[in-house]
Image: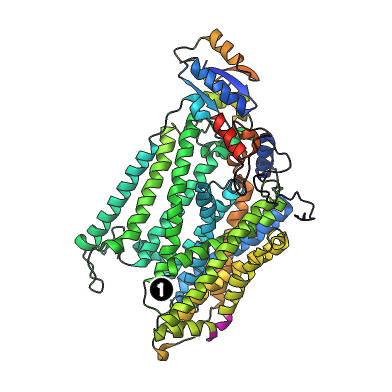
Amino acid sequence: MHRAIALGEHDNTAYVPGRPTELILDGHTFTSVTDTVCGIVEAPRPPRAWYIAFAVTVSLTVMLFAMLYLLITRGIGVWGVNSTVGWGWAIVNFVFWVGIGHAGTLISAILFLLRQKWRTSINRFAEAMTIFAVVCAGIFPAIHVGRVWAVHWLFPLPNYHAMWPNFRSPLLWDVFAVGTYATVSLLFWYTGMVPDLATLRDRARTKWRQIIYGIFAIGWRGSHRHWHRFEKAYLILAGLATPLVLSVHSVVSFDFAVSIIPGWHTTIFPPYFVAGAVFSGFAMVGTLLVPARQWFGLKPFITRHHLDNMNKIILATGSMVGYAYAMEFFIAWYGGNAFESFAFVNRAFGPYAWAYWIMISCNVISPQLFWFKRIRTSLPAMWIIYIFVNIGMWFERFVITVTSLSRDFLPSSWAYYKPTTVDILTFVGSFGLFFTLVLLFVRYLPMVAMAEVKTVMPAASAHGGPAHPVGDYHGDIPQDNLDRSKEAH
Amino acid sequence: MHGLVVEFDDPRRLVAACAKVREAGYRRWDAHTPFPIHGMDAAMGIRGTRLPWLVLAGGAAGLGAALLMIWWMNAMDYPLNISGKPLFGLPAAIPVAFELTVLFSAFAAFLGMWIANGLPRLHHPLLQHEPFRRATSDRFFIVIESTDPRFDPQATRALLASLGGLAVTEVQEQIHEEGAGR
């Protein structure tokens, strides 16, 4: 028998085959969904905690820009990189932030194609997180080139050298992959948000709100002839974003895999990076959603069922990452290449062993606790695991980038890499920028995709009613429900 | 007058009502809802959009542009010899070609959809109709425009009133601010 979790919340995590799980709780109606979600944005003043958080994150963002100023005026000597380890925290942070973004696209695009209705409650938030993470990621490749004023040479723009970039370089592929990813994510996010912006426009009580939301709602009137094309375009964008998200972290992994450095030159990198990206991104979505649903009264929308599903994805992708770590070791031994085996033994037992074992405990061991339903549905437990995964996935990129470079083919050139204060403060500052953007988002934009949430409510179904509930099915959909839906057509 | 509007509070009634408006032979009419409703395309007789073909063309353009750009830049305009590798090789061109295919397709879908829908449009008579403010929240509307050849102020109003909605109202073409005459 299922045991209810006594935390004063409706528990919808019991799986009864054939009976769908309710996705929106507390008897919400269309009206109350609009009121709840718009109410957050329309409140004259955000909660006091918002101001405190905003003050902290803006200060950190200012610190980020101060560090960037220091870097640009003094040169990359302010970083800990040396001639052996030429890729330091800048690359680690870039891969970390790009990876975080992947969960948003997985939720918005892949789960949409798989008809996972629970995604409607969290997709807006996750897509916003994607865009903010990509903004943070984009800073690092731009500054790590050293001469930031020449960063436009990354793009195929006519310049006074009359030269073009080298299209056989993975670093240029990266420019196109991340650029396309940022652009398509933004288009997808904005497209989905237009109907909700129109809701805010129509509810606006001040002239300014009406004008600003009116401009961004571009005249949306909910016409069904418009909805028809809108839904088709949304489906196509989801279909495009799905291979795109797989390609982005594959291309990021090519930055490493196409080189000949031991520990980087492996064919497992693209799928392993993609799994790791989704893993880290879900952890970050969870890190933000668990407090956000509490503070903004979104518990009936982002229910335990939703969190439970996310935790299962974290368990699955975490296990894939663990498998990839094991397989790297196996191939290093089985491949019989002395440099390759050394690189891996060095990772686990060399000077950076501490980082390697932090990575293993956070990424491989901690998500395995999600096999237990009690942990999957416990808010404090899941939040602690999210934090572990965030830490572990940052260390994964650190281990990959730094250990292979610090000890490669020639022992006389080996060196130990240590970050400087500037490295650390730049990274901390990027969190400031990320959370500043998140705080602005929750204050000014609809955090839950209202139009999409309404479609998964029982009252929205054209042939619905108590006998024909709408929600997430488990196991087979009962035959009589299928028959009934056929009759309705 | 822009047209006549009937308001519903239940999507199921709206679908049935749309089928009746369609049967009555109207052409310049529409349903406005806060979210897409399953079964409405059939009830309203909306034919499939050609948007996918536009996206296909966008994708093909992106693919072609990418391959042409890479070949021209690295093999023709400024041949770059990188460790003796071929000046233009398809495998090395794939990542950028793929990304630009996706980028162009996405823009085709995004711009194509909004343009086909006649948006952005910052002004519309319906947006000045007070009850219509709830069309993006919790109410469902059918609008029959006065430019429809079958439109007749009395008969159309009677049809809309018979659909089981909450209220039938008139939408004015233009509401002028005081003193701001045409």
- Rendered location of residue A325, percent (x, y): 51, 74
Q: Which colour scheme is used?
A: rainbow
Give the image location of residue A66, x and y in percent: 54, 67
Q: In which quarter of the image is residue A449?
A: top right
On screen, A359 above or below A305? below
| Classed neighbour count for the residue bearing mark 1: other residues with Cα under 10 Å, few (<14), some (14–19), many (≥20) | many
Relative to B156, residue A285 above or below: below
Name the residue: 77% across, 56% down: A3
Residue A352 colored in magenta in the image:
yes
Chain letter of disc 1 in the image: A
Q: Is residue A83 visible?
A: no
The magenta segment is A349-354
**Residue found 51% across the figure and 76% down from its top:** A399
Q: Nearer the viewer, residue B77 or A327?
A: A327
The residue that appears at 65% across and 41% down in the rendered structure is A38
x 61%, y 56%: residue: A310
Give the farthest residue toward the top.
Answer: B154
**Residue carrying label 1:** A266
- In this rendered view, identify the residue nearer to me: B145 or A487: A487
Label count reads 1
Looking at the rendered structure, the secondary structure element under dot 1 is loop
Image side of residue B39 versus residue B63, left or right: right
